[in-house]
Image (cartoon, coloured by chain):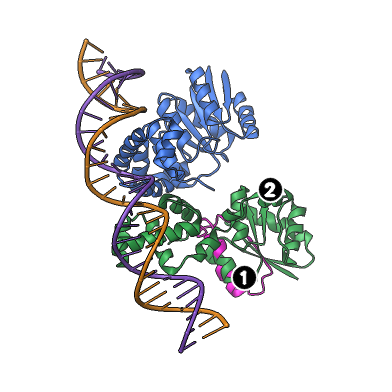
Chain colours: A blue, B green, C orange, D purple
DNA sequence: ATAAGACTAATACTTTAGTTGTAAATAATG
DNA sequence: CATTATTTACAACTAAAGTATTAGTCTTAT
């Protein structure tokens, strides 16, 4: 009995995936969510989920924030990222943020099923093409990803608000904490990212931007 | 006799476009390119091109750089941007950077042909939906390019250094002026760009990614 | 039970950022 | 040529950013 969660904000694609996967697994239960919030809620209510199929572009998932949240909050549940974009940069970030596999949306159904079975068995999975490309990548970008993965959820949240151009005072109000607390978080973020100013932090984060 | 240039790095899409457009125009010649370099070369060799169908995501076209190059180098040739993304921000930038039309890739073929005819006649073209949305946008944001054009050379230079993550002190040293002068320049830049912190200025500039 | 890490926050402090007013040099306009 | 306007320059001042230290409360893991 396998229990999947499909997290994607495109209803058509979710349905297509359900239709394609159902005949290929003996016993299967498929849950669905369409935003980061609903994904986290579903995970909380269903701790026995075996695998998450995660889209990178859901509401609330700006950049890699959704993936980071899910892999940090539920490190025991394997995540397969399903995405339309398959640039090698994105793939390398995805894998270093803790996903167990990257499945381009154009992958044939049978292959997707193979991928999911492998990932459920604790393996990592990539298309042959991507596996080769990943091996050729230099460590620079991966370092950045690891730095950011070290951040706690709160720290990432603060970084995200800095990245939105907010002042410390505004961030404090947004998070319902004092400015002192915000500063403490920011200092921690700077140490982990190895920068000294919010401007540099923003520039670093911009490198991860997925904006199309 | 109409002469088009389709600039898109996706061969399948180019072919689909050629196949769809050929029957809809009496006399038509369609050239193709798949990168910014090949686009500029083709334009140089064919000054009589009537219309460019430009994709935003070709190699060399990071952000809006490709569009800016083409419209600045060949202001007399109308450009129709063809893109999968149709967020209103992107559309408004595209239009303010001199494109004559924005055609979502999901537009029906017949409508695309209409659009291209209109654009060749010197009109601008948008889907009805986008036209409405564009009208609702705050005009200040649309004219980011013009705002930046208002900057004096010194101001632009300072902005560039801010964008590199330098401190005021470092900028002052770089330009051989005092920190006070740098601050004055920065204040002027902020007024013109309508922001109030360097972080916001960097974010604004990043949208254009004009450096390099 | 204890140790470790995360979140919160206060205090005190230093540095950086940004505003405003003012004046010299420079371009441009009539 | 004279006179405006713009650019560049700077100081004094206020606001915001950032560091360091300490410390209390949680949760989680050992």
Question: Could you say which disc has been placed on residue B115 in the image?
Answer: none
* Residue interval drawn in magenta: B40-68
Residue B106 image label: 2
- Tag 1 residue: B75
Residue at (75, 61) in percent of width and height: B22
Q: Are marks 1 and 2 on the same chain?
A: yes
Q: Chain of mark 1?
A: B
Q: Earlier in the sequence, mark 1 or mark 2?
A: 1
On the question of residue B61 being in view, the answer is yes
Residue at 46 percent across and 43 percent down: it is: A164
Residue at screen point 52% across, 20% down: A2
Residue name at image x 72 percent, y 57 percent: B19
- In the rendered structure, the residue with mark 2 lies on which chain? B
The one nearer the camera, B139 or B87, is B139
- Does residue B103 appear to the left or right of B140 in the view shown? right
Is residue A60 toward the left or the right of residue D19 in the image? right
Spot occupied by residue A152 in the image (x, y as percentages of width and height): 36, 32
Instruction: Please rate how many residues cluster around mark 2, counting C-alpha atoms within 10 Å: few if below 14, some from 14 to 19, many from 20.
Output: few
Task: Please tell me how many numbered marks the rendered image carries.
Answer: 2
């Amino acid at each position: 009995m396998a229990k999947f969660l499909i997290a994607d904000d495109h209803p058509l694609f979710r349905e297509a995936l359900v239709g394609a996967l159902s005949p290929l697994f003996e016993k299967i239960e498929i849950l669905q969510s369409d935003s980061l919030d609903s994904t986290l809620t579903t995970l909380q209510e269903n701790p026995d989920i075996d695998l998450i199929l995660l889209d990178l572009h859901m509401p609330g998932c700006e950049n890699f924030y959704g993936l980071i949240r899910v892999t940090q909050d539920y490190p025991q549940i394997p995540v397969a990222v399903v995405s339309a974009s398959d640039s090698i940069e994105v793939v390398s970030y995805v894998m270093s943020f803790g996903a167990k596999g990257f499945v381009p949306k154009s992958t044939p159904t049978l292959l997707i099923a193979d991928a999911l079975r492998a990932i459920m068995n604790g393996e990592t999975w990539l298309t042959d093409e991507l596996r080769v490309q990943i091996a050729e990548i230099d460590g620079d970008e991966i370092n950045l990803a690891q730095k950011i993965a070290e951040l706690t959820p709160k720290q990432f949240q603060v970084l995200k608000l800095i990245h939105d151009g907010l002042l410390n005072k505004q961030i404090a109000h947004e998070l319902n904490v004092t400015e002192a607390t915000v500063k403490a978080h920011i200092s921690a973020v700077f140490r982990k990212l190895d920068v000294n100013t919010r401007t540099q932090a923003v520039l670093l984060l911009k490198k991860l931007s997925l904006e199309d």
